[in-house]
Amino acid sequence: MFGLIGSRSIKSQRTCVSAGTVFRNSSRRAHDPLRILFCGSDEFSITSLQALNRVRQADPELVASMDVVCRPAKPVQRARKVLREVPIAPVARHLDLPLHQIDTFTKWTPPTPSQGPFNLIVAVSFGLLVPPRILSVARYGGLNVHPSLLPEYITYFIVSEDPTATDGDRFRGPAPLHHTLLRSRTRTGVTLQTLHPTNFDGGIIIEQTPFLGIEHGTETVEELRDLLAPIGAQMLVQALMDGTFVRPVQGFERIKGGPSSTEPSYAHKIGPKDRHIDWSTWTASDILKRQKVIGPLWNITEAQVKNRLGQHKAAKRIIWDQGFSLLEADCHLHPPVGHPIIVGLHAPTQKVCIRTCDGNILVADKVKVEGQNTAEASLAARRTGFAPRTHLHEPVAFYSRLE
């Protein structure tokens, strides 16, 4: 879709027409060799970094130099003695690129490469807003690759035979991949935009996958990321080759009479509350989807605790470490919604089952009860007592509901 053939002094005018609406992209001009400050973090940004580095090696008159900025390593685990780097850090070292690890731009000034000061900032899945004092120094400003179709200005229109067709996935915010899948959006795309000095995802759109987007057919964030990352990287490289980022026209000048743009959905950062199962409203399908997209999920349960004062019940977090599977067969289990039970006569074959609000039964795999090691769900239930044991068709005194 986006070939690597191009000219840095290209002058073009693109016009797309649909239903009487015209969007025009004005002429561009050549630019100096680029000295790039690349800001990234994860695997999605690594793909763009590697693509730019290949260009730097093949054509130093296009990309003269590149430094990498990322967040510093953070302590993980309860002891907080192990440091985990963001994925892009070791990649930058492997590519022998200068690396700067910062937690904030406050009081930080970019170094000056031997070829001269940075003249372009590129931010991909970075997480920090590049401040105006740094952005304004770069002659060509900044660019951002965003894995969604931002809604303000639509680059292309495609006439669809389906009058009910929607405009695909349009998410502003830090987690568009997750929300595309969580909201069951079947189409998505990539946007290349300028960096706005004060707002995330508020820049001028340089390029975008066609209207209606890509029918992605993926189920996990990793699959969707691996589909979109090469498209975004190629879009970024092509923009540098064509010079379309130099003095971009605001929003592909919209001709009077065109359709109004849709408001964006905000894709908030995924946090613990998004993984907290609400058994009263989440269907089995909802739980299995979230497990696949953002798992592992969790609840609060009453568990048996032993200490110097004896044994008593206490509220403990239970993490459904390896999720659930749907019980396909009709087993005639009818526990209250959200109340776990142990089903089976013998320990090796026992299962922890939970009924969902839509009447399905989910079988838990391995779990981690707070203060305990990860174990098979039935073993953890017997140890901590968060679920009673029952035989089919026998009455049971149900324990407290998962919260």
Image (cartoon, helix red, strand yellow):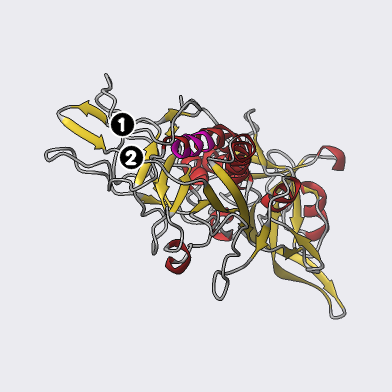
Q: Is residue 66 visible?
A: yes
Badge 1 element: loop
Observer-nearest of 130 and 364: 130
The outermost residue toward the top is 161
Look at label 1 and name its amino acid: Ser
For the point 56% across and 76% down, which residue is it? 107
Look at label 2 and name its amino acid: Arg
Observer-nearest of 199 and 299: 199
Q: CA distance from mark 1 to mark 2?
A: 7 Å
Give coordinates of residue 392: x percent, y percent: 71, 38
- The numbered disc on residue 216 is none
For the point 42% across and 35% down, which residue is it? 242
Residue 349 shown in magenta: no
Q: Is residue 312 above or below residue 169?
A: below
The part of the image, by quadrant, that contains residue 168 is top left
Give coordinates of residue 386: x percent, y percent: 72, 58
Observer-nearest of 30 and 186: 30
Give coordinates of residue 356: x percent, y percent: 55, 44
Q: Which residues are magenta?
A: 233-240
Badge 2 element: loop
Q: Is residue 310 above or below residue 137?
A: below
Instruction: Kindly indicate whether the residue at mark 2 contacts the one at mark 1 (C-beta within 8 angstroms).
Output: yes
Give coordinates of residue 207: x percent, y percent: 38, 38
Residue that carries the numbered disc 1 in the rendered image: 12
Could you tell which of marks 1 and 2 lies nearer the N-terminus?
A: 1
Horizontal side of 108 relative to 139 (left or right) equals right
